[in-house]
Image: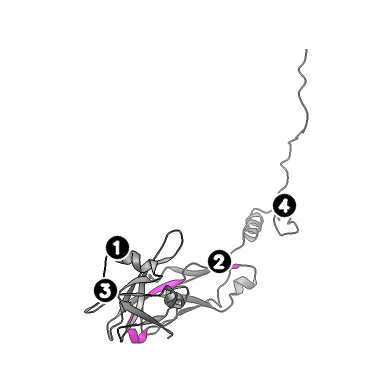
Amino acid sequence: MEVVKIKGEVRKELGKKSTKALRREGKVPCNLYGKNTSLHFSAKPADFKEIIYTPNFKKAEVEVDGETHRCIIKKVDFHPVTEEILHIDLLKLVEGRKVRVQIPVHLQGTPPGVVDGGRLVQTLRKAEIKTTPDQLINELFVDVSNLQMGETVRVKHIGRTDQFEILNNDSIPVASVQVPRVLKTAAEMLEEGAVPELDEEGEPIEGEEEGTETTEGTEETPQE
């Protein structure tokens, strides 16, 4: 698993005034928590770039005053307008102590339903797992190579081992092959016994209602 190294400095003062001063210096205030551990430090926002601005799950290795801490990002606060990093909370990893983390879910394979004209839509991009630090993984996979049009894969279909426990409900949808609107419309009309006429873009051509006439640009002349 990829580990991002971060160099931190102990925060000698706490409070709003100190926090604002740190941000003016181009640093971000951070808190590191864990079993019998509570460390307040600051670091450069750029050091967190490879662990925050990525869909992949990574560990962090924070060095403060010569001591190294293996940890994971638990929470990041952003400015609502500028999206500047305002604060970061990290959780120290303790050997043998299980943690809960959000792991990216990736799809594998090409569904036959997509080949037939369907659209593959992923609705769950991260799943929560529970495991020990030594069993942490970068990503989870679900096979969609057998999905037909209109079918769905769920959390229970995600590949797994005894190394971790998936906490999401097994029935939650992960991805599905959706039927395009044009095919739905055509199928509905066929069920009603009418075959739709399609335009150049494959959209059904709607006919005018019978028994109606429209006259444009005329006025009714009042009778004397």
In terms of sequence position, does the residue under pointer 2 or pointer 1 come before the other? 1
Tell me how far mark 2 sits from mark 4, CA to CA. Answer: 25 Å
In terms of sequence position, does the residue under pointer 2 or pointer 4 come before the other? 2
In terms of sequence position, does the residue under pointer 3 or pointer 4 come before the other? 3
The residue type indicated by label 4 comes to: Ile
Based on the displayed image, in which of its 4 quarters is residue 113 positioned? Answer: bottom right
Tell me how far mark 3 sits from mark 4, CA to CA. Answer: 72 Å
Give x and y (percent) for residue 70.
33, 83
Secondary structure beneath disc 1? helix
Secondary structure beneath disc 3? loop
Whether the residues at callouts 2 and 4 have beta carbons within 8 Å, the answer is no
Q: Looking at the figure, which quarter contains the N terminus? A: bottom left
Secondary structure beneath disc 4? loop
Give x and y (percent) for residue 73.
37, 75
The residue type indicated by label 1 comes to: Lys
Magenta highlight range: 118-136
> Is residue 194 shown above or below 146?
above
Q: Residue 12 got which mark?
A: 3
